[in-house]
Structures are given as structure tokens and as C-alpha cells.
Amino acid sequence: MTQLSPVLKQATPVVAVRGEGLHLFDADDRRYLDFTSGVGVTSTGHCHPRVVEAVQRQAARLVHGQYTTVLHEPLLTLTERLGEVLPEGLDSLFYVASGSEAVEAALRLARHATGRPNVIVFDGSFHGRTMGAAALTTAGTRFRAGIGPLIPGVVVAPFPAAFRLGTDLGLSEEAAVEYALRGLDHVLATVSAPAETAAMFVEPVLGEGGYVPAPPGFLAGLRERADRHGILLVFDEVQSGFGRTGRFWAHQYHDGVVPDVLVTAKGLASGYPLSAIAAPTALMRKAWPGSQGGTYGGNAVACAAALATLDVIRDERLVENAAEQGRRLTDGLRKVAAGAPVVADVRGPGLMVGNEFCRPDGTPDPATAQRAQQAAAGLGLLLLTCGVHLNVVRMVPALVVTAEQIDEAVALWSKAVAAATT
């Protein structure tokens, strides 16, 4: 009998048969409060009626029109509509199906456009599992071990993870930014000459690396160095974009800092596979002929889902809801942490919140984090871990989450942490 790959490890024992809003249900109709959102994908909740209706309507008309063969209305309309939310000047889009593919496309564009071989990434980065994206990933050896040699030309610079640098080195948040920017300058002086550096890829909030927001001043420091040296600045907003952080894009917390290329996926289409890179047309033109394409990019049904997602986010004011409910969630989690010293830090903007577990000496405590995550699942709250040491339990509910659901999740989490520490 065939089976799923034994390498796939499920974070929870749930076999979901249906979903509705913030809830998943198993075959026995047990309800689970889903604070994973399919790793931040179901941004409008499970089976939002407007998304379902748009998908059903489009599936009855045209399921797929391969976009280098024929164009179709959902693709063209989505391209126009994304102009309403993208940073000014990023007026050209290329679509693929997954975040990893979009990162690969951005990497290819950066090298074509600059004629330079090297790329700088940052400690704790996650950009995907395909060969190019894995080479850019430093959030754990599990994403890149055993498949080398990976593509050359990737150099790693420090990320200002304020909690960890404060714990290990006693640095303030401001000092952590200075430390990271000095480290970047050292990389440019010793390993990757500016004239050989095509791009810097950075997540405004580290995802798999532990839900670590870039502190104020860091992205501006990257922008200044990129401009000074003619390096492209690429923001990977696969997990942090589309309202997740209480701003439409996480980098909007850093006033005036705009990327040269933006990568988006996950919440873009409420669960349907769609991703994109956005760049100025003049920059996108520098991609070599034939370098952009793919069978499933810009799928008609996925584009229809993305259009409905944009409508729901706008009409239901979900970015504002993410900010409001994110504050409620963070406040509640910090109250839990105040009575549980093993939860050493609660952080993250909006509905992208991490709980970092540490031992009394400040070292990562993945075992307790895992126990808490599993205890939460047993109580009906679905969560995931992340972080280089897998010692961070993350909470990524759909943007439609209510105050009552936040309070329910916090109450269940308090019980889960107590169960994991007794």
C-alpha cells in the first residue's frame, strides 16, 4: 500500500475533514482552534465564503490558461489590483506557484540585472527548500544538509536578533542594529566586494528563524548601503506580507524604506498556490529572455482567489484587525510568560507572534517548547514551532480572528505551558 513519505513529520495528530474560519474539524467533528493558518497561508480563514464563491465561479469558466501561451482576465485584473497595495514604483510582476520559486526568480533577476555573482543573506533567514533558495537559507541545517554543493556566491551577515544578542552579549536593541550593520560592512570589506554583490535578501521579520522582527534602523541601514554600492535590496515578505503584521507589508514599519524587489506568496491567495515577485519595470526588463516562465504560475483559479482575498482584506479591514488583535494576543501571551519564566520572550508585530523558550541560563529550550506545542494540540489549539533551535512556538491565526478567539487561545496556551513545565 502506498503512503506519504516517512520523512514528513506532522506537527499535530489532526486529520482535518473541513474548515471554517479559525476552526478545523476532524472526522469525529472535534473542533480545533487553528493558530497555524497552514503556516500563514489561509489569511482570510478557512473557506471564506467570498473566496469559495470566487473559486467556484472561476473553476466553471477557466481552470488554467498557461500565461506564456494565453492571457486571462483574473491574471490581468490581479496585476492591476496589486498595484494598489505594492510599494510605489514596483510596477512589474512575475507570477509562480510557491515562495521558493519566487525567491529563485528574484535571485535570477538580481544576477541578470547587475551582472554580479554574489548574494548576501542574514543569520536565521529562510527563503525556501529548492536549491537556490536553500543556499540562501540559514534558519537551520535541516533545510540544506546533505544536498550540497549548493550554489556558490552566498555570503551570510549578522541579523540584529535583539533578544538573543541581548541575552548572549548584553546588547541593547540599538546596539544590536549597530552590531549587525558593522558585521555587514565587514562582509563587504572581506568576503563579498560590493562590485561583486548583486543583492541582499532579507526578511523584515524572520519566519522560520524564530519570528524575529528587524529592529528600527536596520532596514534603513541596508537601504543606505544598497544605494551606495549599487546593490539590489530584496525583501522576502512571503510569510510577513498581506496584512499579517498589522501593516500590509512588514517593511512598512520602517518608514520610507522601499525594496528594489519584493517577494510575496502564502497569504496572497487564501490557500491557493500563488506567488510573485514585484520590481520596477526598468529592472524587470533586465531579466534575460526565457528566464521567466513556468507551467502553473498565474493559474486562473488561484488568481481569482487572490482577487477575492484582496476584496476581503479591504472590505473587512483585516489589516487593522491584525494590528488590534495582535496587540491583544501579545498582551495575553506576555501575561502567561510573566508566570512562566521558561517563556523568556514574546515578540512579533500583529498576528505573527513568537514565544521563545529558554533554560534559566538563557540557552534555548526546544524540549519544553515542543511539550507546550503538543499539549496545546491536545487541548484543541494548533500551533507550530520555529527558530534555529526549534525553541520558539509561533502563533499565526487568520486575519479574521476575533477578540473572543484570541482570549480562548491565550487561555488554552496558559494551560499548555503549565502542563509542559510541571
Image (cartoon, grey):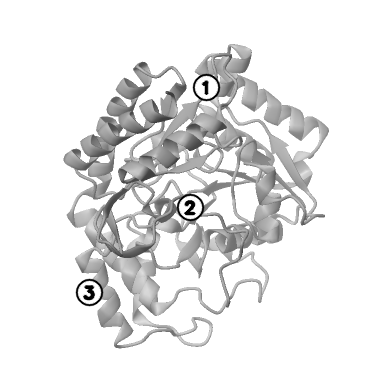
Image side of residue 193 versus residue 360, left or right: right
User: With respect to residue 301, does 203 lie above or below?
Assistant: above
Disc nearest the viewer among 3 and 2? 3
Farthest-out residue, top: 170
Q: Quadrant of residue 306?
A: bottom left
Give neighbour class at mark 3: few <14, some 14-19, many 20+ (Cα, 10 Å). Answer: some
Disc number for residue 137: none
Q: Residue at x 60, y 42 (%)?
A: 125
Disc number for residue 238: 2
Q: Where is mark 1, residue-wise?
A: 163
Q: Quadrant of residue 159?
A: top right
Instruction: Judge whether residue 400 can be spotted in this image.
Output: yes
The residues tagged by marks 3 and 2 sit, at their Cα atoms, a distance apart of 25 Å
C-beta proximity under 8 Å, tags 1 and 3: no
Which of 230 and 344 lies nearest the eye of the viewer? 344
Residue 354 percent across, percent down from the top left: 43, 34
User: With respect to residue 155, does 170 lie above or below?
Assistant: above
On the rendered image, what quadrant is the C terminus found in?
top left
Q: Closer to the N terminus: mark 1 or mark 3?
A: 3
**What type is the residue that disc 3 sits on?**
Glu
Regarding mark 3 in the picture, which secondary structure is present there? Answer: helix
The residues tagged by marks 1 and 3 sit, at their Cα atoms, a distance apart of 44 Å
Q: Residue at x 47, y 35 (%)?
A: 371
Q: Residue at x 53, y 34 (%)?
A: 219
Disc number for residue 53: 3
